[in-house]
Amino acid sequence: MRREAKEPLQLHADFHIAPGNRPLLDSGACVSADTTGVEDTPLTAARRAARAHTTWSDGILGVPALVDLYGSQGFDVLCITDHTCNGLTHITAANYHDYLAEIEREAARASEQYGLLVIPGLELTYSGTDPGESAHALAVGLRSFVSVELGIDGAIETAVTAGAALVAAHPYDDAPSPAGHTPHPGRLTQRFARDPELVSRMHRFELFNRTELFSWVAKAGLPCLATGDFHRLEHLGGWKSVIPCARREEAVVSHLRSRRPVFLAQVDAQAEPMAA
């Protein structure tokens, strides 16, 4: 069941582009290892939010408040990927229609009011007692319900067939966590790092989740992404993705399903309460 949203919040964000990407962004060029269909598409904005959660699962903001937050801060793409979990919690077959309908209503308002593209999706959340068997996969652009009750493998296959872009979320390996950082038990998802066959089914892998780096993704040379994984106010900062494609859902999803490059930007954010 959807929870009530907390008080709306207003944030101010300063975007810092990784130094290696600055010449690209200054020129407006679109550089790609595979330039099919993108060579004439300028990079018109450097503010992309890969994904966020709402009160439909474990976020603090409802869909309208989330749209206002990202829209007012100048982001131009917002992917909403609330959890569907083994154990029938959060998004289920019973409430999926209402979930998608609210996102679609707010997507229309977001486009008209802010020029913000809102893309629906799910975080396919399969968690077990053994981190080596646990995996979460973002299905960006998914417009039909996919269950994980029978395992993550079948859920990923179904979502790919439905046309979604699949991204491995917070893909931990078994390396020790940095000092002072203890991942939540529900985020200890190590199967991607242990299962090459499952890796081969994915389109992208989170290199950064907020400010956390998954270095094995870079060492393996996998196509990557940086996401804010927004649940709470402090998650607006961190690393984000700059996707050099047209601001249309099909263009974003197609780009993420390809091996074309995605550039990374670091976001610093300060928060202050929004006046009532």
Image: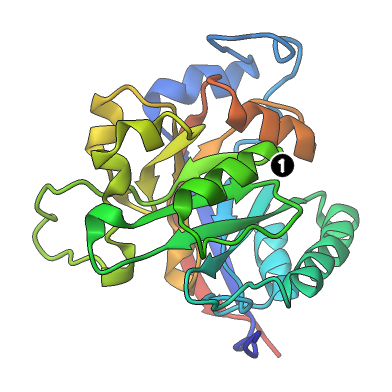
What residue lies at 58% left-to-right and 21% top-to-bottom?
Answer: 26
Which image quadrant: the N terminus?
Answer: bottom right
> Quick check: can you spot residue 75?
no
Q: Amino acid at mark 1?
A: Ala
Name the image quarter holding residue 16: top left
Towards the viewer: 148 or 245: 148
Which image quadrant: the C terminus?
Answer: bottom right
What residue lies at 52% left-to-right and 39% top-to-bottom?
Answer: 241
Residue 146 located left or right of residue 116: left
* Residue 259 coordinates in the image, percent (x, y): 53, 20
> Quick check: can you spot residue 112?
yes
The answer to whether residue 67 is above or below residue 36 is: below
* Residue 205 coordinates in the image, percent (x, y): 42, 38
What residue lies at 26% left-to-right and 40% top-to-bottom?
Answer: 193
Towards the viewer: 209 or 73: 209
Towards the viewer: 190 or 276: 190
The answer to whether residue 187 is above or below residue 2 is: above
Give the residue at mark 1: 162
Name the image quarter holding residue 181: bottom left
Residue 218 located left or right of residue 273: left
Q: Single out the residue that lies furthest toward the front.
A: 150
Answer few, some or many: residues within 10 Å of disc 1's Cα (few below 14, many 20 plus, some between 14 and 19).
Answer: some
Residue 143 located left or right of residue 182: right
